[in-house]
Image: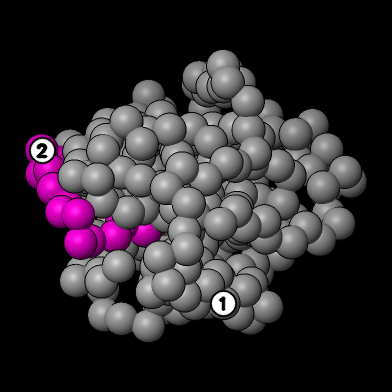
Amino acid sequence: MIIKNVHLFYFSPTYTTKKTAKAIAEGLGAGFTEHDLTFSFESEEEFFLQKDEIAIVGIPVYAGRTPVITRNMLKKIHGNDSLAVAVAVYGNRDYDDALLELKDILSENGFSVIAGGAFIGEHSYTRKVGTKRPDDEDIAKATAFGKEIRKKIDTDTYAKNIKVKGNFPYREDMPAKIFSPMANKNCIYCRKCYIVCPVGAIDKKDPELVDVEKCIHCYACVKVCTFNGREIPGNPLKDIIGFLETKCSKRKEPEIFI
């Protein structure tokens, strides 16, 4: 099959999904059009791909599911028996049902999902789990995955409905949280946190003001701060972080399905 266009879609507040998905796209060995959905939760733009196009779609994993905020975005990516690659990036715990859910969404949108991959990124809650991942080894594996997909396409040896790990019904979404990262005494008002917040939960002028109900707990604001200037008051995630750091620190490797 001849692919005329490659489209890369990703939601990536902390850039780990972006890095991984781009490496896969680059492995395909062709130019690609990049669609960053990170700040598009209110956008009405829709995308319509044709039969001779392929979509690489990357999302982070939130508690074993696709992030709630991404689901309406994903429904706006339409295929016409187009090919697709589903990519889930998780924080070294487990991707549970997220990759299957993403594959199902793309299939419902008119895509033939010919490949899927679960890759690892540094966990949003702690730098001690999946530290600095994706690393060079992860990127090399993502690029090799892209090359393998290209080979399958060029030789017409791909399956149109690959099987991936996961269960249906999907696990429940994580319960709503009534807290969010806030500025602490280390904050220097550089406002980088405001820039990276995908939902505008942080006030543009005063980073001490946060709309807790808007916060999606991606912790991009914490990751981007080089002054340790943001934290969650009272540390309500202490037990979860303790579990992650003691039970999920052993390195996991990407899993691909093709």
Q: Which residue is mark 2?
A: 44
**Which element carries disc 2, helix, strand or loop?**
loop
- Residue at x-position 19% and y-position 54%: 51
The residue nearer to you, when weighing 33 against 136, is: 33
Residue 109 to residue 27: above or below: above
In the rendered image, residue 55 lying in the magenta stretch gets the answer yes
Pointer 2 or 1: first along the chain: 2
Q: Is residue 111 left or right of residue 20?
A: left
Residue lying at 12% horizontally and 43% vertically, measured from the top left: 46
Instruction: Specify the quadrant of the image occupied by residue 170.
Output: top right
* Horizontal and vertical percent position of residue 179: 52, 27
- Find residue 19 and report its horizontal and vertical position in percent: 47, 69
Q: Which stretch did the figure color magenta?
A: 43-59
What residue is shown at x 46% (from left), y 42% (from top)?
161
Residue where numbered disc 1 is placed = 144
Q: Amino acid at mark 2?
A: Glu
